[in-house]
Amino acid sequence: LRWLSWNDGHWAPAVAPFYFEHVIKSQFGLGPPDQALLSAKTADFVRFATVLNGHLSGREHLACGRLTIADFQAASMATHWRQAQMPMNDYPNIVRWLEGLNRLPAWANPWPEE
């Protein structure tokens, strides 16, 4: 519950602007990213990425020493960090964690073919 709540209150609001501005706006033709907004939101991203990166040091998953819903919830937008241009260069533990999730077939390709 701790990491689900932390995600809702801190991490999701920190990554959402990057995801929306670079992924959603592009996908739906809603115009270019609002660079002023992203600049204003970068401090929040850095603050909470620092917390998450520290927590993931020496850990494969967020909670309980195993894969849980907390991993999927916290990674939902962050998994697109490259496309969303999230500044992840200083957060190797987050990148490692996201890459680990992306090795799960159901996470890497969640849209089954009909």
Image (spheres, helix red, strand yellow):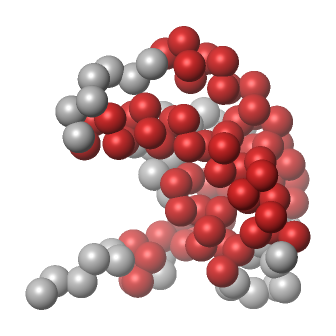
**Residue 6 to residue 83: above or below:** below
Determine the image quadrant of residue 63.
bottom right
Q: Residue at x 67, y 40 (%)?
A: 14
The percent position of residue 100, horizontal first and vertical second, equals: 57, 71
The percent position of residue 36, horizontal first and vertical second, equals: 54, 12
Q: Residue at x 67, y 26 (%)?
A: 42
Q: Is 13 displayed left or right of 80 in the figure?
A: right
Image quadrant in which the N terminus is located:
bottom right
Residue 47 appears anywhere in the view:
yes
Q: Residue at x 84, y 85 (%)?
A: 64
Which residue occupies the foreground of this view, 109 or 2? Answer: 2
Which residue occupies the foreground of this view, 71 or 55? Answer: 71
Q: Is 7 displayed left or right of 112 in the figure?
A: right
The percent position of residue 39, horizontal first and vertical second, equals: 61, 17
**Residue 101 to residue 12: above or below:** below
Q: Residue at x 43, y 32 (%)?
A: 21
> Looking at the image, which residue sits at the far left?
114
The percent position of residue 37, horizontal first and vertical second, equals: 56, 19
Residue 92 appears anywhere in the view:
no
Image quadrant in which the C terminus is located:
bottom left
Determine the image quadrant of residue 73.
bottom right
Determine the image quadrant of residue 108.
bottom left
